[in-house]
Each structure stands twice: as structure tokens, then as C-alpha cells.
Amino acid sequence: MAEFEIGRVVETEFGGKAKILNVIGKGRQSTVYLVQYNSMKMALKWYDTDKVKNLDKIYQNIKRNVKDGEPNNKFLWCKYMTKVDKTTGAFGYFMEVKPDSFEYFVDVMNGYKIVQDSSTKHLTKKSVKFSNLNAMVMAGINIVTAFRKLHEIGKSYHALSDGGFFINTDTGAVLMSDCDTIAPYGEDLDINIRPTYKAPEVLDGGLPDENSDLYTLAVVLFKMLFRGDHMEGRKVIMDICMNEQELAKHYGKEAVFIYDPDNDSNRPIRGIHDNVIKFWGEYPEYIKDAFVRSFTVGKKDPEKRLSLDEWQALFIRLRSEILSCICGKSHFVSMIAKQNDKIFKCPNCGMEFASMKFSNRTFRKPLYIGCKLFECEINPNADDFLSVAGELVENKIRPGLIGIKNCSDSKWSVKMPDGLFHDVTSGKGFPVWNGLEIDFGKVQAKF
């Protein structure tokens, strides 16, 4: 299929018209264009009929997704279909355009993107990194939430790629793409893509389902945290004949996780996999154990993969353990030395931070100005992982006096310096002191 020329008009399924403005990107089986549709700019994904098999299955699936609608606002969903070309059978679909504040996932993994200077036309590298640990962990929580929304409607990814979603590296907001490959459990779109994200049983001919999606999720989270590939180590690099069949073998029947504790044949190579080697040592054991389980026993037995609830709990804990120091460095407290059971010490500048113990977990939460208490931390039954329930703030009138502000809609019972419990309603605050106790209702906390 020849590429559309700029200015070409494409008709929508129901008679509207869209004008081609530019090329956004090209994939193995399609091209994405920027188009003007009515008064809006949208993206048009157009399929190359010479490279796509099962085109009718893909068409019917997209049409169903358009009718069903998006699971939530974390998806760049299929909005409208084009008319089918009577000669070639080619078609496409429209979706919203990625906002400029969102970066391609592959650029986040690489740590940079290639940009063109508008005046000189020179190509240069521009850094693409999370602004802080909190943004990165929030991205993980948002990705898990997006997969949860898919599973609630009985659908899963049948194919995902490095360009399949986008991340705001300042906030951790996520937009999932590749929505044309989202289909109900048990269907076979038979999409020809690289096998990196596919579960071994799908590579072996099985049909995608909820469990295969859990494997795909683990791959996404690994790539985001460690900026590398879960199966690309010495064994894979040494394969000098890396065709599609060999690649499927290394990610399917003969896959070996790069940090498999019982098989060191595929360890990452220094000088090639430096990101993975570096970051593997910077995460708590409970995070590393989750990926070991996902890509060893979980690789062989789909029923033993981490559930969405388990991933959500792990990332909520990871977020709760972030300590952001005034020196500009952030750390996971489970990876730094303690002064004692209650005090954490910044390894960069030596500043000490107190912590709080919650009744529903064994780990302590570090306290620093700006740290937040989330609704899911104080209400075990909450299905809201993003709403802030409280925040540690400095008194505007008395600098140096630290307190916690109730940002929730609930009333808390708090032990004050007078030794008595007082009600603290929404918008009100209370000081952090050595005998502080908070009753959130279903969870209690002590300083």
C-alpha cells in the first residue's frame, strides 16, 4: 500500500471526511497519520493490506471496540472507523492524538528521544526520564489500573509493543494505545508481531486470556522499572541467527529469565545491559522477588502469576516507602540504613526522617514535607489508588512546625499533645508529635 499523500481526504464510515496533515509514525503493519476531522485533530491508524493477515478479524474487533467504548480515560481508544476501500479492502480507525506531555514508552526505556531542531533541522538527543521516583511508581499503579479495567469487561491485550502506550514522566499518568489488539478472552486475532510481550503459552499456540495478560503486564512493569528486557541476556545475545523463530524460542519454550536464581545461563552482560544491572540493585527484594516469580514459575504455570491485586499492593507499598529528601535525592527506605526502628537517614546528606507505623502493615512510612497519605493506605477496602487523603505540611505561621492535613472527606480521631483524642475534619490539620496516634476508622497509625 502506498503511503497517503499530505492533503488526501479519507472518508469515515458514516460519511464524514478527514484530511491527512502529516505522518505521526510507522509500524510493521500500519501507518499512523495526523488528520483534521471536523474541527478536531485526531490520529488515523491505517492498515497495510499487503502485510496484515486476518484483516477481517481485525476489522470486526475494532468495530466491536468502537461500539463497546473505552474502559476508562487511560486508553487512546478506537473512536470511529473509516470506509473500507472497495478495491484493496484497506481501512483504518480514528483515535485521539497523544498529548505533547506524554512520552513514548520506548523513549522512556531508552532514556532519550530524537528531536529535530525547528531552525537547523539537526537531529539531537533529548533526555526522557521520570522527574522523580513518585512519578515512576505512579505510572506503575496507573498501568495496573488500566489492565484491571480491561479485565473487568472480559478483554485482554492480544498484542502489545514498545510503542503501545505513553507516559507523562512528570506525573506518572498513562495512556494505553494499541487498542485495536484488545479483544475478548479466548479470541484469536493472530496478529503478527515480535514476541517480546507475549506469554509463552500464547507463543506456543494458545489463546490470549486473563492469565496471558498478567504475563504481559509483568513484562511492561519490568521494562519500565529496569529499562531493559526480561529475557535478553547472554544466551540470547550469543545467538547469532536471531530470526523470528529463534526469537520466539528465546521468549517461549526456552526462555530463561535474566535473574533466574536457579539458572545463570542468561545473565545480563555488562556493557550491553548496564541499565538492568544498575537498577536491579536499586529496588527492594519484594519487587525483585515478584519478577522472579513472574518469569520462572509464572512462566511455566499461568495460575501462579501475580494477580492484579498483588501488583497493586506491591506498587502501593513501593510508593509508601519513597523518601524525598530536601537535598534533592529520593530513596526507597527499605534500601537505606536506619538510625533505629523509627528513624531513616538519607544516604546522600545524612538528614534524619521519622516514620509512622500503620496497623495494617509491617513496614513504616517515612515522613517528610510533601509526603502524602493515599485513600487506599487508610481504607483497606478502597478501590481508589490515586486520591490523596492527607499530606504532611509545614505551618505557614510557625516555620518548622510540621503537621498533617486531612484532605479526605472523612473525620479522623487524633491524639493531640494534651493527651486527648479530638476529631479532625476535612481541611483541618494537627501537629506531628512524639505521642501522635491517628484513628482513620479501619486503620490506625502511630508516630
Image: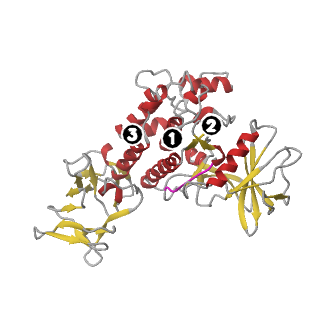
Residue 109: mark = none
- Name the N-terminal-most of marks 2 and 1: 2
Label 3 residue SS:
helix
Residue sitting at 83 percent across and 44 percent down?
A: 89
In the displayed structure, 101 sits above or below 145; it is below
- Badge 2 amino acid: Glu
- Residues drawn in magenta: 172-177
Reading the image, the residue beneath label 1 is 217
- Badge 3 amino acid: Ile
Residue 209 figure quarter:
top right
Of 196 and 423, the residue lying toward us: 423
Reading the image, the residue beneath label 2 is 187
| Residue 299 drawn in magenta | no
Is 51 placed left or right of 389 in the picture?
Answer: right
Reading the image, the residue beneath label 3 is 287
Label 1 residue SS:
helix
Please indicate, yes or no, whether residue 28 appears anywhere in the rendered image: no
Q: Quadrant of the C terminus?
A: bottom left
